[in-house]
């Protein structure tokens, strides 16, 4: 899932984002808007824990591209 797909899936625009927190110890990224927090946590090389759009519950999702993207962001910014 690319950053554009994430914005489209969760129906947020870049202007809605108030802050982004990168946690290198746990390989997770928190994206905060005024009303919600979206967490993306890499679990291994091919899965991510993220909020299900329909239920709002965190779930393990197979997404190797997003998992690798999280590792790349953590490596680049921390």
Image: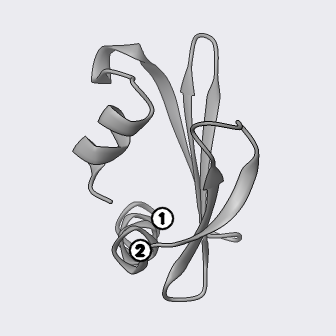
Taking the view exactly as shown, the residue that stands out farthest to the bottom is 45
Q: Position of residue 47 (x, y in %)?
A: 55, 78
Q: Which mark is residue 38?
A: none
Residue drawn where x is 46% and y is 74% of the image:
67
Looking at the rendering, which quadrant does residue 77 occupy? bottom left
Q: Is residue 72 left or right of residue 52?
A: left
User: Is residue 50 shown above or below 53?
Assistant: below
Answer yes or no: is residue 23 visible.
no
Q: Label 1 neighbourhood size at 10 Å, few (<14), some (14-19), many (20+)?
A: few
Residue drawn where x is 61% and y is 36% of the image:
54
* Helix, strand or loop for disc 2: helix
Q: Is residue 34 left or right of residue 17?
A: right
Answer yes or no: is residue 47 visible.
yes
Taking the view exactly as shown, the residue that stands out farthest to the front is 54
* Helix, strand or loop for disc 1: loop
Task: Check disc 2 and report the residue beneath it.
Answer: 75
Look at the image and tell me in which quarter the N terminus lies: bottom left
Q: Label 2 neighbourhood size at 10 Å, few (<14), some (14-19), many (20+)?
A: few
Looking at the rendering, which quadrant does residue 24 occupy? bottom right
Q: Position of residue 7 (x, y in %)?
A: 33, 35
Taking the view exactly as shown, the residue that stands out farthest to the top is 34
Task: Check disc 1 and report the residue beneath it.
Answer: 78
Query: Which of the pair 8/69 is nearer the observer?
Result: 8
User: Is residue 62 shown above or below 1?
Assistant: below
Q: Are marks 2 and 1 in contact (CB under 8 Å)?
A: yes
Taking the view exactly as shown, the residue that stands out farthest to the right is 57
User: Is residue 43 shown above or below 56?
Assistant: below
Residue drawn where x is 28% and y is 46% of the image:
5
- Rounded to the nearest whole Å, what is the CA distance between mark 2 and mark 1? 6 Å
């Amino acid at each position: 899932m690319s950053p554009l797909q994430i914005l489209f899936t969760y129906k947020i625009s870049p202007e809605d984002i108030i802050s982004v927190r990168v946690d290198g110890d746990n390989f997770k990224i928190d994206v905060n808007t005024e009303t919600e927090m979206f967490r993306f946590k890499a679990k291994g090389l091919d899965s991510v824990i993220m909020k299900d759009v329909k239920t709002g519950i965190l779930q393990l999702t197979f997404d190797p591209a997003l998992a690798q993207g999280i590792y790349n962001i953590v490596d680049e910014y921390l």
